[in-house]
Image (spheres, rainbow, N blue to C red):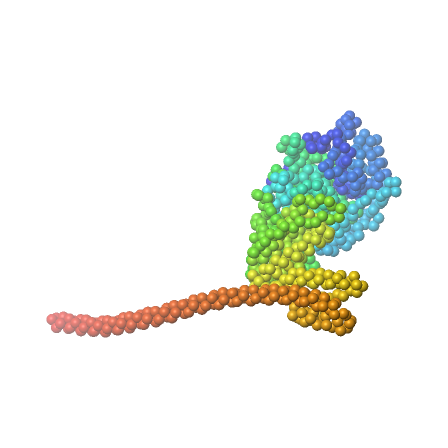
Amino acid sequence: MSTLPIKEEIVDPTDNLDIPTNSTTAMMIPVTSETNGFFGSCFDDNSDDDMEGISPLKKMRAEAALPVGFLDPLPPEERAAWQQSRINAGMASSIGFIAPLRSVRPKAEYHDVPFSRNGQLVVVAGEKQVVAPANIPSCKQFWKAGDYEGIDGGFSAGHSVGMDHVRVHPKFLHSNATSHKWALGAFAELLDNAMDEVCNGATYVSVDVLDNKKEKGKMLLVEDNGGGMTPDKMRQCMSLGYSAKSKLANTIGQYGNGFKTSSMRLGADVIVFSRCQGRDGTSTTQSVGMLSYTFLRSTGKEDIVVPMIDFVKRGETWEMLTRSSVDDWKRNSETIVQWSPYQSEEDLFQQFELLNDQGTRIIIYNLWEDEEGATELDFDTDPQDIQIRGVSRDEKKIEMAKQYPNSRHFLTYQHSLRSYASILYLRLSPGFRIILRGKDVEHHNLVNDMMLSEEITYRPQPVGDETSKDPNAVAVVSIGFVKDAEHHIDIQGFNVYHKNRLIKPFWRVWNAAGSDGRGAIGVLEANFVEPAHDKQGFERTIVLARLEARLQAMQKKYWSSNCHLIGYAKRRNVKNSVSPEKETNATANSKSCSRFSSNGHTFCNDKSKLKSTGGEHDKGPVHSSIQARNQPITQQAQTGQTPGISVVKMEDTVSNLREENQSTKNSLQQVLRDLQYERDRNKTLEGKIKAAEKRISDLDNNHDNLALMLIEERRHWQQQEESLRSRLMDASVTIDELLKKVKVLESRITFSCKTER
């Protein structure tokens, strides 16, 4: 590929870009450094005329503006001194914009010295030269990468009316990424960003593995052909907590933190290339930014700095889009090349040629390793998949997935990216493709794995002061048995989607002691609950607790009603049949108590008490009836009640006994129905057994007939063989006799010839 032609000149970013000249003072503040000034993408949007004071200041307006002073590496008094020096030099700057850090140090004149890869930091203060070694040991394991302390004394607090500026230490990148305990969850965040670009024309997202020729390792590639990012959006992407998607209805991202957490969870460094087509008369731009934990650690940074450079297309030529000076632009470029996986600036810029007209290309390198020195991700087991090693990989489940193909997603999604990506979205936009290592991921709807499925509509109740319910706050729950449920493997749970994205795969809401619940799975989309920041769970709220309880009730009812269809013993719904009876008895008891309260005495039927004390030793309705019969006599003997009261109590007892007898009759009828069902089932099985026996008998007869035929055929062939052998022997004898006669004749002819001579 040819090298990109670069025209070295300062370009006013407001020319032909989507930046109005008369906007509000809300401005984009990039993340910068307070030490070296490598990050030169500072918002100095004044043209040459502005610097001469000819035209008014042009102020940039971002779609999601950062607050003034956010992550400003200079204290307020230094910022004011710098702005004053710019004004004195005839270079007016926009209010709140960050300057190139090399231009001013009010207390000591610092000269920039490039960092070397061995971590030596050279700082010149006046005439005194100080060498600050940054001997930070490199760490390849993700869970130990946050154990480092930076350079002592590198942080200088600035004060402005008693208030300090907030800075973000590089260790925050690691601690922020620990929200992803599962590596495949980090991949899902990157796929979400590509899915959100469907509205901008994205037709695919490709995940692949590349070779790092510079460091001799592997790199991850995530690429899409969406709308790309403008220079301002690139800076929002690299910032923390800024998301323009949070207010959009159909987008997955909402916290503005997914790219940082996911990329830092997979590797120590990430570099992003993006190209955005011009719209509404604006020019096409392309940008490259690098978020490098290795760079920040090795150079002992106390702030997060992100080198970025931009280009703007003029005709057929790509020109520098500078925000302060050409020197700062080149310094950013040199820093990116030095710490990127590319050996030269030419190799770096060639990555833009792979984006065609628009799109984003993310390269994650210096991938994390485990304790044994191997990468956390497994690229070798399946050349068309990305898998993970360690505890998430269960060899037993992998073998079971081969035996039970209808359950393979449950058994493999925890370690296989291909399996997880196939169920990650409930619906896939028409024409959109997810490509993993050169092969399309086949979208799979988990409803297709069900049999005997049902649909249940759930509407959550309003919480707190909520007066009106959202008409869209409804979930249609599809529940059924997995097609391999007849093998009684332990597969169950609900797959809960939020805005088309799988948040809780196979969520177990019912943890029964025995085999109850096995084989029952469900699918629903719940947009009325909020996902957690890592999108691997939901925020624990009252709405979620109610949903969990309702799903548990659904699973219990469905499994108890249908478990006999997959080979389990039929369950009787004891709770539902007993509870109405208890309510009836309680009502009768309360009436009995209130009947005699007017006489100053309260007489209550204690049958419910006897039932409750019986506990597990209660033998059923007959046992309770005996207790009820004996109870009035015992009470009368102990309390000495009058005969009239005893007669009334007997009437209540008789009424309760009748109710119990009716309940007993119902139970017996249910038992008879179950017995009849079992009889019918036995008859059906007997018929099937007889049919099978008949078929076996027919097969035996056919086998005998075939055996007889084979015997006859063998006998016939033996006879033919013997006949042929005898004929062959006769022919041999005849040949021998003829040979003898020929010899005799030859001898006679020879003798006659000698005689004549």
Most foreground residue, 319 or 573:
573
Q: Which residue sits at x=74%, y=50%?
A: 176
Q: Residue at x 76, y 63 (%)?
A: 596
User: Which quarter of the rendering shows the C terminus?
Assistant: bottom left
Depth check, front residue: 509 or 144: 509
Instruction: Residue 247: tell me if it is visible.
Output: yes
- In the displayed orientation, state which residue is furthest to the left: 756
Q: Position of residue 337 (x, y in %)?
A: 69, 43
Residue sitting at 71 percent across and 55 percent down? Answer: 141
Query: Residue 424: where, in percent of width, then height?
Result: 62, 50
Question: What residue occupies the far right of the structure in this picture?
Answer: 162
> Would residue 614 appear left or right of 707 to someone viewing this image?
right
Looking at the image, residue 128 lies above or below residue 725: above
Q: Which quadrant of the structure image shows residue 238?
A: top right
For residue 660, which quarter of the picture? bottom right
Tell me which residue sits at (18%, 73%) in the image.
741
Q: Is residue 377 visible?
A: no
* Left or right of 603 on screen, residue 402: left
Numbered label tally: 0
Position in image of residue 588 (x %, y %): 71, 62
Image side of residue 164 versus residue 357, left or right:
right
Q: Residue furthest front?
A: 644
User: Which residue is most to the top?
Assistant: 54
Near-viewer residue (241 or 651): 651
Relative to 647, is 371 above or below?
A: above
Query: Which quadrant holds the N terminus?
Result: top right
Give the answer, above or below, for where 330 lies relative to 485.
Answer: above
Q: Which is nearer the eye, 179 or 679? A: 679
**Which image quadrant is residue 243 in?**
top right
Q: Can you give x and y, in whole percent of width and height, for residue 247 in the image?
A: 70, 41
